[in-house]
Amino acid sequence: MTRGVAILGSTGSIGTQALDVLSHHRDEYRVVALAAGANTELLARQADEFGVPDAMARACADEPGVLAELASLPEADVVLNAVVGFAGLPATLAALGAGKRLALANKESLIAAGPVVAKARAAGGGEIIPVDSEHSAVWQCLRGGRASEVGRIVLTASGGPFRGRTREQLQAVTIADALAHPTWSMGPKITVDSSTLMNKGLEVIEAHELFDVGFDRIDVVVHPQSIVHSMVEFCDGATIAQLSMPDMRLPIALALGAPNRLPRSYGAIDWSTVGHLDFEVPDLTTFPCLALAYEAGRMGGTAPAILSAANEVAVEAFLAGRIAWTGIADVVQEVLSAGAGNADEIDDVLEADRDARERAVGIAAARSTR
């Protein structure tokens, strides 16, 4: 019996790689729904290749309700949420509420609305399998021990394109500079987040939500080779790590097939060419976004939602050439400094998101370089 898969964000980096994985397992999986933003030409080609009816291949740039609709389809056993940003929240809630397996690549929905997502998961009986390479690595490492035996989680960061530079050296970096990631091929928003280390900060909050580990037991180390994807240290001092060459198809395939591994190799290591593995402490002076994420995570409530929303606005302003790269952290810090409220219900999160975006737009405009 085949398993039905709905891919939300099918024309993006994760979505296209997921379809590549599924193309090799057509006897086991069938694509039942596709959703994209505005790339309707690619969406149509994908639907034709995988036999998805027109009604189930939807462009949803102007119809956000489509994501929740497709995420709760009875035919979908697995929902891959690869939508970028806070817009992925309705799909996350719908999939979990409908008892689906959620292959989660949209970290912002879990970060912004952790308590609300937890309620939806408990009520609907759905499960989350992380697609981020770091959280997939932790998920795999945790097979080596019980949750009660976990001492700390260590997330690895590539360091992005600006590793080793000072804040002064980064005052005039260009958009092209920020998008030149040394090891991963990702969309522009996530690539900029990687350059500021905000991506790693968001992953710290996500790890807290996924694995129920306190922020004092989640560390970040810079690992420029991007071969060790993360580690778990257990109470007896043993550390288990997951290693592979950078290839997002590996965690995508695992999320589709878990707890089993699909029998096709992605990212296998040629140990004769690795040479060495380096690890460094992140520079929080040059990359303050990571410290801001820890701050928001410890604040709790709507603070992570505020952090995520302000960052989305700031990154958009940078990509549009309106603020400097260093201005991203400045905008986020100013918005976050206003404080946060409770995040018990979805309306709390939505209101915090709207308010943070409005304030971030105003602050970014005041800092405009144009």
Image (cartoon, helix red, strand yellow):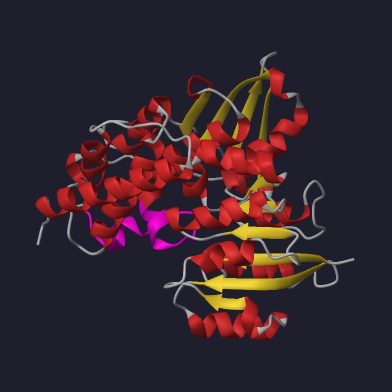
Q: How many marks?
A: 0
Q: Which quadrant holds residue 336?
A: top left
Residue 106 seen from this side: yes
Residue at image location 47% in from the left, 66% down from the top: 64
Residue 85 seen from this side: no
Q: Which quadrant holds residue 196?
A: top left
List the single residue furthest toward the right: 1
Residue range (magenta): 172-192
Q: Is residue 167 left or right of residue 53?
A: left
Q: Residue 237: say if magenta.
A: no
Q: Is residue 202 left or right of residue 320?
A: right
Figure check: 136 above or below 283: below
Residue 132 horizontal/vertical position (percent): 57, 48
Residue 137 horizontal/vertical position (percent): 64, 41
Residue at image location 63% in from the left, 84% down from the top: 54
Residue 159 horizontal/vertical position (percent): 41, 42
Residue at image location 61% in from the left, 55% down from the top: 94
